[in-house]
Image (cartoon, grey):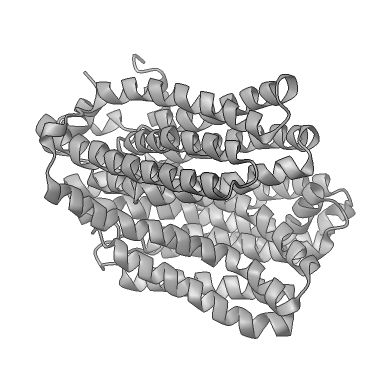
Amino acid sequence: MSSAANVIDPSVPARARAGVTTHYLRYATGNVLVMVAGFISFPIMTRLLDTSQYGIFGYFDAWLLILAALFKLGAQHTILRFYPHAGGRSALARFGANHILAPFAVSSVLWMLGVVAYAVIVFSTPPEAATVGWIMLMLLLPTMWISYVNAFAFAEERSDVSVRISVGQRWCETACILLVVYFIARSTLGVYLARLGVALTFAIGLTFWLRRNVPLRARYFDASEYIDGLRYGVPLVLNEIAATLLAFADRLMLRLLLVDFAAVGVYTIGYGLALNINNLFNLALYNAYTQVSVREFETNGAAAVLRTKRAVLHGLVYFCAMMIVGLVVVGADGLLLMAGSDKTASAPVFVLIGIVYTLDGLLSICGAGLLLLKRSRSVLLLTLSAAVLNVILNFFLIPRFGVMGAAYSSMLSFTALNTARYLTCPRELRALPDARATVIAVALGALCVAIAHFTQLGGVQSHALRILMLAALLLIGFVAPAFMLDGDLRAAALRHFASVRQRTHPTR
């Protein structure tokens, strides 16, 4: 039986599905593996490509991301939210026609218009590296199709497949790019040719996988269903743009108000490292929680979502408390270890923005619910309002506090955004972490900070050793007492390990 059939069959037992924790661990591991590929390729690429070639690569890559987001019209979000968790094969067939085939056909039309527009540009006033532009456009179509298939795997709660797609494509690209650039063409053209080959291979292979899991027949097309998906998806495209402004407008404001690229550099180094927390923690958590909550809302209603949310928040409050302790005590050590001892000015930015993203991961779960009701325009309005608030705050805080003024603006903007998310979330879907668990987490976190402060972690000067000593302190002073004091936390951990053991050894 296909995985799609299993998803829509209500008789499938709950143990057939991985839980939020398992999905999170998969996505977090996948994100780490993708980052490792970047750490391997970056120093090699910067040595094999000269500055101008690297500039061309960055320029066309930005266009690739922008055009892919615009041409998809939010279809990846629609696939997730409109996936039929009930209704049988007929519902799945309508879904395949209206939310995969039809959106990709529209994306293909937009792509062809883009090709025509670029042809006009090339033949009127040929731009630099025009050939690379053509390869970038060829790469765009399989890139969009891979995104569609990945979204379907995500909707099916196939985090194992989704992670294999992202990690496999990234590592294949890394290997092929390095081989082509080293042995054949040390230019951006060589990079894009390698990426095109990998993308085409993945797109073809994933097409066969998709056809085995969902019917793709145009005769099931229904214009009203497609329009419903479009109304939901397009605001989320704009929301992505607004979220980008929320995260990156500070750098433009620093340059505008301080007229100093050095200040922008100080901020970018600290903020850039903090973004890794967002990638490893928030994105993985969002992916894991969202795919489960959508299915539970469609099949069992708001009450089931609320139960899952409270279970997730119960463990998450402990994790966030430990993350914040780590940032407060050895956050500066982590940045100096990664960026170099001369980057001390960026450490306060990293610590504050790291805390902001850690709390954002927790609070965004508390107020998650608007997308379950398909209120994507409300989500767009909230994000856009936070981005505008960030710009306004920067005008007042950067002249007074300099680089940290931009960090304070981000902190206040994210706080306002998460407060608004919670207040606009329907009552039956919003929740806060368990009060007793929160008190325990905060108390143990404060205890660990106090111990680290008064002992100075044994006076150790090495950044790496200070991080290791704090890890040992957290294990003894936070993790062990937390499991001793919170019976529900112990029970949840035991259930998770039993579930993993059952999936790993089903005959036992």
Q: Is residue 362 left or right of residue 247?
A: left
The correct choice, above or below, for 262 with respect to 293 in the image is below
Nearer to the camera, 196 or 474:
196
Percent x, y of residue 134: 52, 37
Nearer to the camera, 508 or 486:
508
* Residue at the spot 42% in from the left edge and 32% down from the top edge: 142
* Residue at the spot 66% in from the left edge and 52% down from the top edge: 477
Residue 246 visible, this angle? yes
The image quadrant that residue 353 belongs to is bottom right
Q: Is residue 151 left or right of residue 386?
A: left
The correct choice, above or below, for 185 with respect to 141 in the image is above
Which quadrant would the C terminus be assigned to in this image?
top left
The correct choice, above or below, for 433 with respect to 503 in the image is below
Percent x, y of residue 87: 11, 37
The image quadrant that residue 171 belongs to is top right
* Residue at the spot 37% in from the left edge and 46% down from the top edge: 113
The image quadrant that residue 351 belongs to is bottom right
Percent x, y of residue 36: 65, 34
Tell me how many marks there are: 0
Percent x, y of residue 198: 52, 25
Nearer to the camera, 301 or 247:
247
Which quadrant would the N terminus be assigned to in this image?
top left
Residue furthest to the top: 507
Q: Is residue 166 left or right of residue 258?
A: left
Q: Is residue 405 left or right of residue 29?
A: right
Residue furthest to the front: 124
Residue 437 visible, this angle? no
The correct choice, above or below, for 238 with respect to 223 in the image is below
